Image: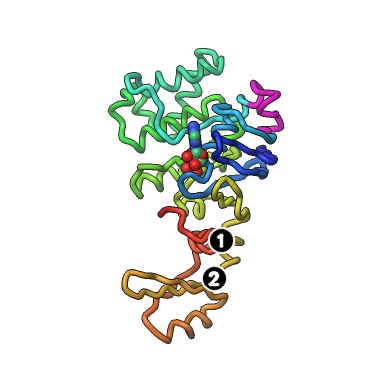
Amino acid sequence: MIAIEELYKNYGPKKALNGISLTVERGELFAYLGPNGAGKSTTIRILTGLTRMTSGRASLGGFDIETQVTLAKHQFGVVQQYVNLDQELTVFENLDIHGRLFGMSKRARRKKVDTLLAYIEMEDRADTLVKSLSGGLKRRVTIARALLHEPGILFLDEPTVGLDAAIRRRIWALIKKIQQQGTTIFLTTHHIEEAEFLAQRVAFLDNGRIVALDTPEHLMESVGHWAVDQFAGSEMTTSYFKTRQKANTFKAEGEFTLRRVNLEDAFLSLIGRKVQS
Ligand code: ADP
């Protein structure tokens, strides 16, 4: 559904994207994970037509984003990092305007808005002014808006940024539900847990390059299965082991914590620093 070949983006001397190539299969949830400044938003901005690439090729649903712009634009919905709803309008009005932009009839819009409000469990909020909604509810409205014209691809740029842990989990459940309906999802995040929980495959991005791309399981296995954290003053060092037995033998020698390897460990070992510093 998404194909990117040798994508470069320069901002003056800055190489924001330095040769990105990847494909995302139909129905897949693909996470694009990297620290701030890695190039995540730039990739989404290019794919969604907000900025031009310096060189490379990309297609959405088989349509080239530079030579088949209109067809490519109908393939996706996008949820930007920051809520960009009209705060002075109601939930219904915000969704309705978006449907009009896509040329949907009044009847089709009403039907689709009702369905989506039920889908995001906000049927009772249709006439509420957006400015009076909480951050989590606003995020749900932006997701519903992105789905209004029934796109095959949904781009989510840091969908849970600024939300607390409980609300974040509700958004995760909604994202899973959308994928289960067959939508292909391209998610950018610097929340490692989000990628580990949601994605079938994860790309680790650093300085505009893909450093690793695989399933979360394979990325974690490349490090080991068990981790032993050792604390000395304010410093922590971590050692990785294939088996629990080996980790336990090592642990027996001092003050350590034993735990399962997570995706943060894989990122740290491959990139040499944490995603969130
Ligand atoms: P991320 O989304 O991973 O945090 P971005 O894609 O926003 O990263 O940015 C990648 C790099 O490109 C950063 O070094 C950033 O400073 C730079 N950059 C992004 N947008 C612009 C811009 N409009 N002008 C100049 N530099 C930019």
Neighbour tally class for label 2: few under 14, some 14-19, many 20 plus, Cα within 10 Å: some
Q: Magenta segment range?
A: 58-72
Q: Residue at x 63, y 55 (%)?
A: 214
Q: Is mark 1 within 8 Å of ligand 1?
A: no
2 or 273: nearer the viewer:
273
Residue 52 appears at what percent x and percent y?
Answer: 60, 28
Single out the mark in the foreground, 2 or 1: 1
Q: Residue at x 46, y 58 (%)?
A: 274
Magenta-span inclusion, residue 236: no
**Does residue 129 appear anywhere in the picture?**
yes
Mark 2 / mark 1, whichever is N-terminal: 2
Q: Which residue is mark 1?
A: 270
- The answer to whether 230 appears left or right of 57 in the picture is left
The answer to whether residue 46 is above or below residue 252 is: above
Q: Which residue is mark 2?
A: 225
- Element at label 1: helix
**What is the three-letter code of the residue carrying label 2?**
His
User: Where the C terminus falls, by quadrant?
Assistant: bottom left
Q: Residue at x 46, y 41 (%)?
A: 158
Residue at the extreme top = 106
Number of numbered discs overlaid on the protein picture = 2
Residue at the extreme left = 132
**What is the three-letter code of the residue carrying label 1?**
Leu
